[in-house]
Image (cartoon, coloured by chain):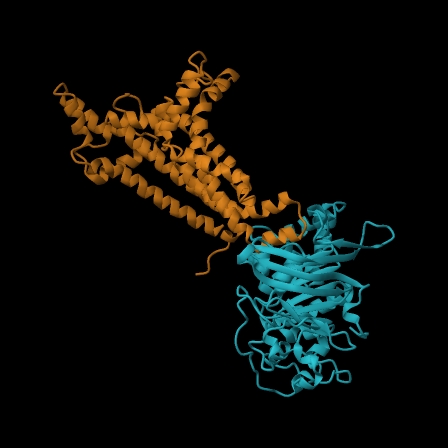
Amino acid sequence: MEETITPDAINAENDTVLDIENFSVDYGWGENAVRAVNNVTLSVRRSRVLGVAGESGSGKSTLVYAVTRLLRSPGVIAGGNARLTFDDPSASDSKRRTVDLMAATSRELRSIRWSQLSIVLQSALNALNPVLRIGHEFDEVLKAHRSGMNKAQRRERATELLGMVGLNDDRLARFPHELSGGQRQRIMIALALALDPQLVIMDEPTTALDVVTQREIINELAQLRARFGFSMIFITHDLSLLVELADDIAVMYAGNVVEWAPATDLYTAPRHPYTLGLLNSSPPLSGERRELVGIAGSPPDLSQPLSGCSFHARCPYALERCATDVPELRVLDQTGRKVACWLHDTPAMVPAPLRRELATAQPHPQVSDPVTGEEVAQ
Amino acid sequence: MRMLARRLSLYVVTAWVAITVNFLLPRLMPGNPVQTLIGKMTGQITPQQVQAIRLAFGMDLNQNLWDQYMGYWHQLLLGNLGVSITLSTPVATVLASAVPWTVGLIGVSTILSFIIGTFAGALLGWFRGSRLDSIIPVATFFQAVPYFFLGTVVLLVFGSNLHWFPVLGAYSPSVTPGMHWDFVLSLIRYGQLPVITIVLSSIAGWMLGMRNMMITMIAEDFVLMAVAKGLPRRKVIMHAARNAVLPSVANLSLAIGLVVSGALLVELVFNYPGVGNLLLQAVQNEDYPLIQGIFLIITMTVLGANLLADVLYFILDPRTRTEAAV
């Protein structure tokens, strides 16, 4: 996981897997429409992990479902672009191919889905069909996308995939309800990797699990990523979890991306008051104990028109203009990190907690090594 | 398997209760059938005949209730259901000639209605809100029209006026019943109209039930997953339908249970020689042994159908196979 973040790395144009541009999503139509995702621009770098953090209703899942064209009614894509770039397996010269996900036909989408873009949902119990055996789930995916494989080969591949997540192939004959929550989620991860996709979307994959299982699965994910090099979007409300796993983190609030930065920078030196609030409300991974402080107030009602910054009503540092002018997500400094906050317009006005030095000299703020899972001395 | 065995023992108990009630019912009625019968004969009856009737009913006055009950069981196990008073034929023989007609007619209609309705319901659920939805009020209309009225109208229009279909009976009087092609063709030809009537008037239930369950299932994560997996649409629909069909299967068992009894009106309208017709005759003639026999058959089919549904459910839904934690 050694990496050097070159300036402007997080929006390096040429090596991204997924580009999301000015993306907006509504729930409902016309006057009753509620804007759930507002003009979001994000990208996922090749073989990197983009963490998307935010509380419930921040639009993080909606964004991802809309981008992958999996959003269900009454969700409506109100505008924006999304492009998926992947190594085309059918092209002999292994050329990269870019597909405009918004313009793709259902046939194109079908061929991209799972083979280039797979997804793991929060509840594996609901994501697995209750009346089908686990083996069937693997079989149908391989059947649909790898028509050349015969039954024995499909079975072999399924066994191999289960082995990757530490499960015996006798699980293939089981039904979902016969397995534990951790096993089910491991099966979902194995299933997501079945076709060597370019990008795997994890929608709160560990939220429904206990912390021990959560830890095991996060470590396994890091290992699998080191081995296969797929890109990942990891959605969670748990910012401290993301710091370990993600290369970049985008923080969403009320449908907007308010901060987007390399994970370590965002964790050690947040620049947006909301990010700071999120960090203060979860226990630190290392260092001295401190009092946990929640964010006062509650997220805005998106069905009402908002003026200014969506966070201004809860922001302890709000300026006068925050209530009227909408801040844009702009590049803040030479690292390429972005923030949508008026405070940074006048550097002298930035309060101390949002001015912390970047942790360039400090060790990576993690308790355990993502590859080996070993605890790092605190 | 233990689960199934436990269910089975429950069925045995239920069957015993049903048979016992069937035995007690005529004996609890005001007056008694023997008396009614004797009354009908207006004095032209000898004491020997009276005793013969009593014996035929298993209502020997010299026996107490317990001995009568034992006798009833004994005869039942021998397959002896008594003798029909009006037809002077053993009840078992009468039933054997009527049951196949009803089971054939109503069974075929019920299964056809189930298959077509469920299939249509799955598609209606998947393509909800499309123009396909206009089928629903039409189907509901046919279900709302009384069964026998629909039958009469269909009979008048397509049978009597247009002469597209034969009007009465189960097969052409010119063919002799038997296992040959002519007879089978005639059966199908004569069966069409009643089958169409029953299917028309019952399909809406299957369709709406399946449609609603489909809509519930479509919201489930595993259907979203099926789409995300890039499966062909047919397979995605199957993911939802495979789960949505479970309540319909439970309902099918109830419907099959009514196959033997539920066709009274259709059989009357189309003059079909089945159990419904027989029951009506038996009631009109106060033919108690026959009524009792028919009740027994109906009870047993309902139980049998329920058992069948349990087994089917057991196969279709793996979750029912695990024992409930007590």
Residue B137 position in % (x across, y down)? 45, 37
Please report the residue visible at 40 percent of the width from the left and 33 percent of the height from the top.
B259
Q: Is residue B116 visible?
A: yes
In this view, which residue lies farthest toward the right?
Answer: A93
Q: Quadrant of residue B177?
A: top left
Which of B199/B135 is in front?
A: B135
Which sits in the foreground, A356 or A108? A356
Please name the residue shown 63% across and 71% down the image.
Answer: A326
Q: Residue furthest top?
A: B174
What residue is rendered at 74% in x and 57% in y?
A83
Counting from the top left corner in percent of width and height, residue A28 is at 55, 56
The answer to whether residue A372 is above or below residue B130 is below
Numbered marks: total: 0
Q: Which quadrant holds residue A241? A: bottom right
**Residue drawn 59% across the image and 63% down it:** A36
**Chain painted orange:** B
Q: Quadrant of residue A224?
A: bottom right
**Residue B190 image position (x, y, % from top left):** 45, 20
In the image: residue A159, left or right of residue B92? right
Residue B119, image x, y percentages:
54, 38
Q: Can you tell which chain is drawn cyan?
A: A
Quadrant location of the N terminus of chain A in the rendered image: bottom right
Quadrant location of the C terminus of chain A in the rendered image = bottom right
Q: Is residue A171 visible?
A: no
Please state which of residues A315 and B259 is positioned toward the viewer in this rendering.
A315
